[in-house]
Structures are given as C-alpha cells and as structure tokens.
Amino acid sequence: MIFGMTVMELIGQIFGLIAVAISFVAYQMPTQKKILFMNLLVTVAILLNYAFIGATTGMILNVVCVIRNLIFMNRDKKIFSYKFYPYLLMVIIGGLSLCTSEGTYSILITIGLIINTFALSLTNPQATRYCMAISCSFIFAYNVFVFSIGGMMNEAVAITSSVLGIIRHRKTTAPSA
C-alpha cells in the first residue's frame, strides 16, 4: 500500500495524470482532426486508468471511445464517412453500460460519453468545444464516485480548456461606426 492505494491503483492514478497532461492542450488544437488525435491519446490513458483502479464501466466504455476516435479521425476515408457511425456508437455506449453492475452512478459516464461522442462527430471545432464542456461535467462526477484522481483532474482540465478554447476561437466582429 502506497498512499493508501494498492500498487495497481497507484499505477492507474499515474495513467490518469498522464491523461491530464495530454488533455491540457487537446481542446486548444486549431482543427477537428488534431482535437480528435489528442482526445484519442487521452482516451487510451483514461482507459488504462480505469482498468487499474477497477472502474469497469469507464474502462469498457472507453474501449468504444478509442474505436470512435479512430473512426472520426479517418472520416475522410470512404469506409468511415457514413453518417450512421455516431448514432451506432452512442447506442453501443448505452447498451454496454447496461451490461455493467458498477452502480447507478455509471449513468453519469454513460450520458457524458454519449454527449462526448456527439461532440466529436461534429465537424465544427467550436461546437465540439461547447459539447465537451457539458459532457466532461458528467464524466467528472463519475470520476468522483470511482475515485479517479487523474480522471477528476483530466475532466477539470478538459472543461477549462474547452471554455478557454471557446473564448479564444470565438469570432469577433468589429463594432460598427
């Protein structure tokens, strides 16, 4: 036991902190493809975080999110260009969450990742940032329940980064004379 955690839990928390470092810059990226790539790295780190701390729902749903990010990153290729993918992925996330018995708080990550999937399916980076701020709030609450320190920090950073990105990339108009 280190800091009251098993070695496995400590390793999981480290993966969560790695996700925080990557997430810090994710929503500042200027293009949707770069946001998706950074989000893919964050998702893999969080998946490992959940696996090591025993957060089953989060781990299973983040496997789907890795696939989701790969699909969305490659939507310019014919096989991944179909409009049904976001809806199919949202249904899979909802269905898989029903298969876990982690607790009623699992609905938080389910709602968050469904909104997150919708957000990442958008082609407008600014709309993505707005949706991410909302979805990350649900996922933050889930992380409180499963005690993922890195997860909580990651979602706080993602919310902050999304809001800063919204402000930074908003279209400004010159005042009329």
Image (cartoon, rainbow, N blue to C red):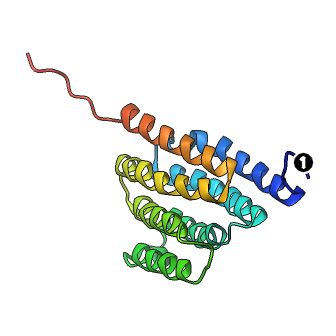
Residue at x-position 64% and y-position 71%: 63
Q: Observer-nearest residue: 114 or 146?
A: 146
Query: Quadrant location of residue 165?
Result: top left
Query: Quadrant location of residue 83?
Result: bottom left
> In this rendering, would 85 be left or right of 46?
left
Query: Quadrant location of residue 97?
Result: bottom right
* Picture coordinates of residue 122, whole percent (x, y): 38, 60
Q: Quadrant of the C terminus?
A: top left
Residue type, numbered disc 1: Ile
| 59 is higher (above) or lower (below) than 5 | below
| 149 is higher (above) or lower (below) than 176 | below
Residue at x-position 62% and y-position 43%: 153
Q: In the image as oriented, which residue stretches furthest toward the top?
A: 177
Q: Observer-nearest residue: 73 or 110?
A: 110
Q: In the image as oriented, which residue stretches furthest toward the left?
A: 177
* Picture coordinates of residue 159, whole percent (x, y): 48, 43
Question: Which SS class for mark 1?
Answer: loop
Tally the marks: 1
> In this rendering, would 52 be left or right of 172?
right
Residue at x-position 54% and y-position 66%: 105
| 92 is higher (above) or lower (below) than 158 | below
Crowding near the residue tagged with mark 1, few <14, some 14–19, many ≥20 C-alpha atoms within 10 Å: few
Q: Observer-nearest residue: 51 or 71?
A: 51
Q: Which residue is mark 1?
A: 2
* Picture coordinates of residue 82, whole percent (x, y): 40, 77
Q: Observer-nearest residue: 6 or 33?
A: 6
